[in-house]
Image: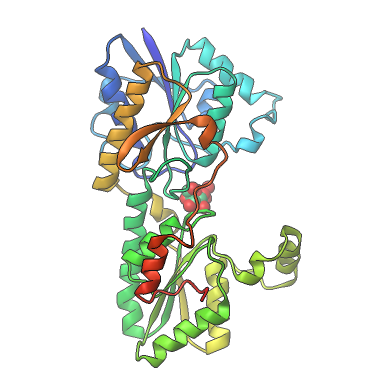
Amino acid sequence: MIRIGMLTSGGDCQSLNATMRGVAKALYRMPGDIEIVGFVDGYKGLIYEEYRVMKPENFSGILTTGGTILGTSRQPFKLMRTPDENGLNKVEAMKHTYKKLKLECLVVLGGNGSQKTANLLREEGLNVVSLPKTIDNDLWGTDITFGFQSAINVATNAIDCIHTTAASHGRVFIVEVMGHKVGWLTLHAGIAGGADIILLPEIPYDLDIVIKALKSRAQNGKKFSILAVAEGAISKEDACMTKKELKEKKKNGVVYPSVAYEIGAQITERTGQEVRVTVPGHMQRGGDPCPYDRVLSTRLGAEAAKLINNKEYGYMVAVNNNEIVKIPLADVAGKLKTVDPESSIVKEAKMIGISFGDE
Ligand code: F6P
């Protein structure tokens, strides 16, 4: 019997189940007697030996469902080598579980931190195959991650809904979009939702330019404006500060729940305009996977199973020009894929008049 461990790690997304289904369906069709062991709540299950022996039927009927049938948790990479409250060495515990269960390999569905841990386990001698999950689309080595398109749909829908009320009231609206330290989700949802101003972490904004863009819209007879602001957006001024200086600034100034609220307050103060802030938050990770993600997940899952069948370990399956490829985990771990301010998509958005608050 060939026993394969599987886990979903970090923040969830819509297409985790579809991806596990893809891996499992392809694996069960491969030669040999395959048994899949699902770890509960990500690496936590591997550390504390909490697992379920899966049956083929467990992977049926889950293509269209969001969340994860295995559960997930955040086990920060930087604490992986720190003993838990009972002094347990987590890395050794994971290796112990892997060996005890006589796993042939471990399949990890995860984002940045989870890929780093997957690579650490690879370095420790475990056979690992990983898949690129995250609504943030910030994994290095892949053109796209599963979950990203579904999250774009949710964030775009939020901006669409805001559009009608913004138009009725003639207000300035800010929609804060997830994405952690990168602006992929905001950029795509902002363009798809017809936002007038898009603020991204990769393009620090100048508030004067944002205000100018708002005023120019008003002067052109536009009664409302919509800003899509990434949760990690940063002003030019703040981007030039050291971490210490930023901390000091926060200590001495007004504390806002997030950057979107700060920008909203500044716009009102400077223009007297009414501003409303909407934060779709975790809705962006919820609901069902969109058709694009279902296809992507199925493809990635099948190719991950192929790697396992070929005993090709230490890779993340990835997308390169619509082909599924394998990227060494060692290359992926610890690298962030950010939006290039000079990329054509940003330039094209600027060509139609979207302001990024930078020029
Ligand atoms: O990585 C996915 C993500 O949703 C980010 O966009 C966001 O910054 C973060 O997770 C939120 O994390 P949590 O679910 O732990 O609040």
- The image position of residue 24, as x and y in percent, is 31, 24
**Above or below, 7 relative to 31:** below
**Left or right, 323 with reference to 108:** left
Residue 274 seen: no
**Left or right, 115 with reference to 17:** right
Q: Residue at x 58, y 72 (%)?
A: 262
Q: Residue at x 54, y 64 (%)?
A: 233
Residue 109 seen: yes
Q: Quadrant of the N terminus?
A: top left
Query: Which of these two is toward me, 353 or 7?
Result: 353
**Left or right, 188 with reference to 127:** left
- Residue 8: image quadrant is top left
- The image position of residue 258, as x and y in percent, is 56, 65
Query: Which of these two is toward me, 343 or 227?
Result: 343
**Above or below, 285 relative to 350:** above
**Above or below, 56 relative to 353:** above
- The image position of residue 280, as x and y in percent, is 42, 61
- Residue 68: image quadrant is top left
**Above or below, 168 relative to 198:** below
Q: Residue at x 71, y 25 (%)?
A: 87
- The image position of residue 228, as x and y in percent, is 43, 68
